[in-house]
Amino acid sequence: EAQVTQNPRYLITVTGKKLTVTCSQNMNHEYMSWYRQDPGLGLRQIYYSMNVEVTDKGDVPEGYKVSRKEKRNFPLILESPSPNQTSLYFCASSFEGKINSPLHFGNGTRLTVT
Amino acid sequence: AQKITQTQPGMFVQEKEAVTLDCTYDTSDPSYGLFWYKQPSSGEMIFLIYQGSYDQQNATEGRYSLNFQKARKSANLVISASQLGDSAMYFCAMREVLSNDYKLSFGAGTTVTVRA
């Protein structure tokens, strides 16, 4: 089954404790990205990747890191989480360079930072 | 500037009736794509329908249709014969060719509640 898998689904952590949210897709998509969703703001892009070893900042990159060592994986790293990073996070992927290619989303990771 | 505007935070609709969700967009790119996604209470994002800026006809997918008015820069989603399972948040989104990041720009969403 074609899918984007992200883990964990729920995560509660404390300020400053490094964490990683994993993301993997099995559709051979070149393009992958991370979004955060906050009430009233819709979804905002954090980072994106056009292909292996190619990553770039989105609209809200502060406090986040990513890597793309393999085509299928695109982990999101929070080196020192803060309470304002409490949010619902989505990983997504699509074919690169095609505006008619919809983003396929993972099921989301609900992160709470206390 | 806001690229996607959804002016209806929440709507109620009676089961079996049609509902229209408003979406206006802002772009100077002649080539772009418009998408609608559904987010049920379980949280996942489900792709519903796509409309390309050069498409001559309005897109349709089952009970979903997109009322695309290019000159007005609007891309309203119409859900016909509403079902209880249509209760969810709906997001309008746009992808622009000239955007280097190929991101989807999302609106704030509209919550639809279907009443029995």
Image: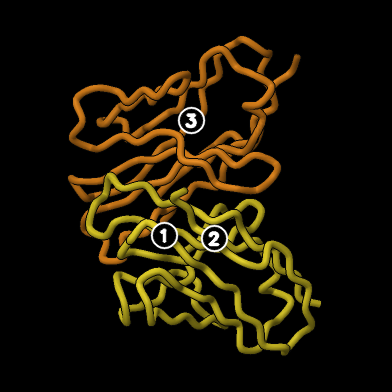
Chain colours: A yellow, B orange
Q: Residue at x 68, y 83 (%)?
A: A81
Residue A34 in the image: above or below residue B28: below
Query: Marks 3 and 2, Cα distance to the nearest angstrom?
Result: 31 Å
Identify which amino acid the numbered label 1 is placed on.
Answer: Asn
Mark 3 and mark 1 on one chain: no
Instruction: Give the mark toward the camera: 3 or 2.
Output: 2
Is label 1 in contact with label 2 (beta carbons under 8 Å)?
A: yes
**Amino acid type at image mark 3:** Asp
Q: Report, in whole angstroms, how far the alpha carbon at label 1 lies from the one at label 2.
A: 9 Å
- Amino acid tagged 2: Thr
Residue B40 to residue B115: above or below: below
Viewer-side residue, B42 vs B88: B42
Disc 2 sits on a residue from what chain? A
Q: Residues within 10 Å of mark 3 (few under 14, many from 20)?
A: some
Q: Picture quarter containing residue A51?
A: bottom left
Horizontally, residue B53 falls left or right of residue B73, namely: left
Question: What residue is pinned by disc 1?
Answer: A26
Q: Mark 3 and mark 2, same subunit?
A: no
Asked which secondary structure carries label 2, the reply is strand
| Residue A110 sits above or below residue B27 on the image | below
* Residue B87 falls in image quadrant: top right
Asked whether the residues under marks 1 and 2 belong to the same chain, the reply is: yes
User: Which residue is the site of mark 3?
Assistant: B22
Instruction: Specify few, some or many for label 2: CA neighbours under 10 Å numbering under 14, 14-19, or 20 or more.
Output: many
Q: Pointer 2: what residue?
A: A5
Position in image of residue A72 (x %, y %): 40, 69
Q: Position of residue B35 (x, y in %)?
A: 39, 40
Please, what secondary structure does the residue beneath circle 1 have?
loop
Judged by depth in the image, the label closer to the viewer, 3 or 1, is 1
Q: Quadrant of the C terminus of chain A?
A: bottom right
- Residue A48 is situated, as x and y percent measured from the top left of the image, at 39, 70
